[in-house]
Amino acid sequence: MKTNLVVQAMGSEKNVADVEKMVKEELKLKGVKMTSIDTLDVYYKPVENEIYYVMTAKDGSTLEGQLENC
């Protein structure tokens, strides 16, 4: 079974898989290898149209960021 999770708010919508992909692409641009990630928390704020993330690496280091106007 394939599930698509879409968030709709204020006349726009975001596919959750697309949001995850955008964050992972941003992390790759910052030189983060996907295999080094232990946890990745992603927050989508539809009112502000922004995505925030907190990545924790397997070595315990963290990286926070945001994507605006997504």
Image (cartoon, rainbow, N blue to C red):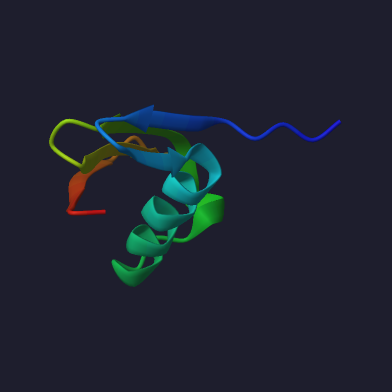
Residue furthest right in the image: 1
**Quadrant of res 26:** bottom left
Quarter of the picture containing the N terminus is top right
Q: Is residue 51 left or right of residue 13?
A: left
Residue 59 at what x, y percent from top left?
A: 39, 40
Tally of numbered discs: 0
Residue 11 location, x and y as percent? 29, 37
The part of the image, by quadrant, that contains residue 32 is bottom left
Q: Nearer the viewer, residue 6 or 10?
A: 10
Whether residue 6 sits left or right of residue 25 in the image: it is right
Query: Does residue 53 lie above or below 7 as drawn?
Result: below
Of residue 22 and residue 27, the one placed in the foreground of this image is 22
Residue drawn 42% across and 42% down?
14
Residue for point 72% across, 31% down: 3
Q: Is residue 25 above or below residue 20?
A: below
The residue sitting at 29% across, 66% down in the picture is: 30
Q: Residue at x 41, y 63 (%)?
A: 25
Q: Is residue 58 visible?
A: no
- On-image quarter of the C terminus: bottom left
Q: Position of residue 15 (x, y in %)?
A: 50, 42
Q: Residue 61's x, y, as percent?
A: 28, 40
From where the camera sits, is residue 56 visible? yes
